[in-house]
Structures are given as C-alpha cells and as structure tokens.
Image (cartoon, rainbow, N blue to C red):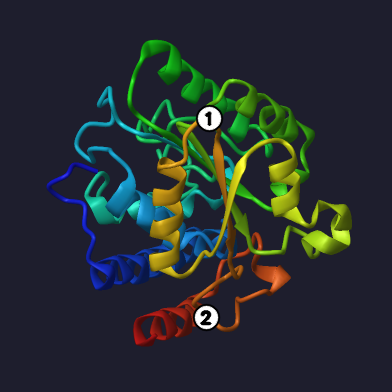
C-alpha cells in the first residue's frame, strides 16, 4: 500500500480486521461455499501486511517495486479478497460473485483475471517455492522489494515446502518471509492427529537455517513486531509462526471442523456478524 494510505494506528487496523471478518462471512454465505474458518484465522496477518507493512498500490497491480504476497493456502483466499475490497482495489459488491462462473473471485486465487494476486495457488505446498523464486529474482535484479508467503500449518506437511525451506537459506534470502498460520486444524482433523511429527514446527524451520519468530497471530502489535523483526534480520530468510484460532471471531465456528469448507447459513451469518461487530 502506498505510504499515503498505510497506517500505524492500532485501532484503525483493528477496525479494518473487523470489517474484513464481516466481508468473509458475507461473501462465503452469498456463494454458499468456500472456506470461512481458514480465512478468519489469518485476518490479522493479512491486515498487518496489506494495511501497514506491505508496499503495494490498490490502484496499480503492476507497480514494479511492490512487495509480493503469495497466499500458499489458496483456499483461504477470501481473506485476501476482503483486503482488496477494504483497500478499494475491487468493488465491495464484487465479493458477492465469489466462486460464481465467470467471476474473477474464484475459490483459489487467479492471477490472470485478478492481477493483484501474485500466483495461482491451491494445490497445497507450492507457494513457498514460488515465493522463493520471486525473492531470488529480486536479489538477482538488485531490487528492494520483499516477498511474503502465507502458509497453513496442515499445508506444510507437503514435501515441496521443505525443499524450499532447505534452499532459501543457501541463497541467503533475507528478503523472503514465510508466515505459518498455525491454527492447529486441517480439513478432517487436528494437525497433530494427522501428522504428529510436524511439531515442534519452529524447531523444524530452525534446523533448516531460518530465523524463527513466534507470535500470537491475532495480536496486531505482535504481528507487526514480528514482521519488523523479519525485515531487520540480515543474511537468512525469516519465518513467523503465528498461533491462531481457526474461525477466530465467530464462537460457533472456532475450532469446528464442519466449517472448514462450509459456509454459514443465512441465519448463522446474521449471528456471526453480530458477534464480530460486538467484539
């Protein structure tokens, strides 16, 4: 976001996050599909980046020196669409076209029809490799922009993630920042039940040579500080392990597996929005 529109005001960022949560509920309910809970868990991360730290221009998707953001957990893309609408990059009413035939707002990001998205993701586990390539390109071009990659904790069970994890430190890509949305739940069960050896996640990244930062992923102050620490760490890539709650902000969705790929009903959406606005 341009320097003229980004903010350091914590309350303003909290207000943005609240409005984004409402949009996520509204758009997934309108489409009667989508992944509301994994979108809700990453709201503060996307808010901190797109409204405070990320260098981008909502009116110029091709700005050459923009920072790159890859949402590797592509099914969580409603949170990104909510950020675009909040920033004025897309009209609010377009959100109601989520997942409709012909819409730019598909269930996974489509960089051809919506150029603000940097990469087509959704086949899980590929985003970090794409982001590493972008960071390497910036290094080779002598460019100053940074690359951020948001991953799910269940997603990092994919082997390609660890190929990128091994490679990025070799190239000294301190312009690359991975962010793990550590909400502990994946499609059918908890991450621990599916593959208990994934934990401790932070130690895995340290073993590959990354600078690891842990934070509460819903505390904007901590998320902003983590992003700043990553940007100030020289010589190696950084990864932020952000502890989050799946479905954060809606009591009957939090940690509930049934809402992984299921939208709220109209009645549930009314209740969800009331909760979000009263928080």
Q: From the viewer's side, name the closer residue of 204 and 49.
A: 204
Give x and y (percent) for residue 75: 58, 48
Q: From the viewer's side, name the closer residue of 174 and 201.
A: 174
Determine which quarter of the picture holds residue 246.
bottom right
Q: Which residue is mark 2?
A: 268
Residue at 33% over, 25% down: 144
Give x and y (percent) for residue 24: 44, 63
Q: Residue furthest left?
A: 4
Mark 2 residue crowding within 10 angstroms, few (<14) / some (14–19) / many (20+): some
Indicate whether 4 appears above or below 214.
Answer: above
Along the horizontal axis of the image, is 149 left or right of 111? Answer: right
Indicate whether 207 appears above or below 274.
Answer: above
Q: Which mark is residue 131?
A: 1
Q: Quadrant of the N terminus?
A: top left
CA gap between label 1 and label 2 equals 37 Å
Indicate whether 153 appears above or below 123.
Answer: below
Secondary structure under badge 1? helix
**Which label sits in the foreground, 1 or 2?**
1
Q: Residue furthest front?
A: 234
Can residue 59 be seen at all in this image of the molecule? yes
Give x and y (percent) for residue 267: 49, 82
Can residue 105 be seen at all in this image of the molecule? no
Q: Earlier in the sequence, mark 1 or mark 2?
A: 1
């Amino acid at each position: 976001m341009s320097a003229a529109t980004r903010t350091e005001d914590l309350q303003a960022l909290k207000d943005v996050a609240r409005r984004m949560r409402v949009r996520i509920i509204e758009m997934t309910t309108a489409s009667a599909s989508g992944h509301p809970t994994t979108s809700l868990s990453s709201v503060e991360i996307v808010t901190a980046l797109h409204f405070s730290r990320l260098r981008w221009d909502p009116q110029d998707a091709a700005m050459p020196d923009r920072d790159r953001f890859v949402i590797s957990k592509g099914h969580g893309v409603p949170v990104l669409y909510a950020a675009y609408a909040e920033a004025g990059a897309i009209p609010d009413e377009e959100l109601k076209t989520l997942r409709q035939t012909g819409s730019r707002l598909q269930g996974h990001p489509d960089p051809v029809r919506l150029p603000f998205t940097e990469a087509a993701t959704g086949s899980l586990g590929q985003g970090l490799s794409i982001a590493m390539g972008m960071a390497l390109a910036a290094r080779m071009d002598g460019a100053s922009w940074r690359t951020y990659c948001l991953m799910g904790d269940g997603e990092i069970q994919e082997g390609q993630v660890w190929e990128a994890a091994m490679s990025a430190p070799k190239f000294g890509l301190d312009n690359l920042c991975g962010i793990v949305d550590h909400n502990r739940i994946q499609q059918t069960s908890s991450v621990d039940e599916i593959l208990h050896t994934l934990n401790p996640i932070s130690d895995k990244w340290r073993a590959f040579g990354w600078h690891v930062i842990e934070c509460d992923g819903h505390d904007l102050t901590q998320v902003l500080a983590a992003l700043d620490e990553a940007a100030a760490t020289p010589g190696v890539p950084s990864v932020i392990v952000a502890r989050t709650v799946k479905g954060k902000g809606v009591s009957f969705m939090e940690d509930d597996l049934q809402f992984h790929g299921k939208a709220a009903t109209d009645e549930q959406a009314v209740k969800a929005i009331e909760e979000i606005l009263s928080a």
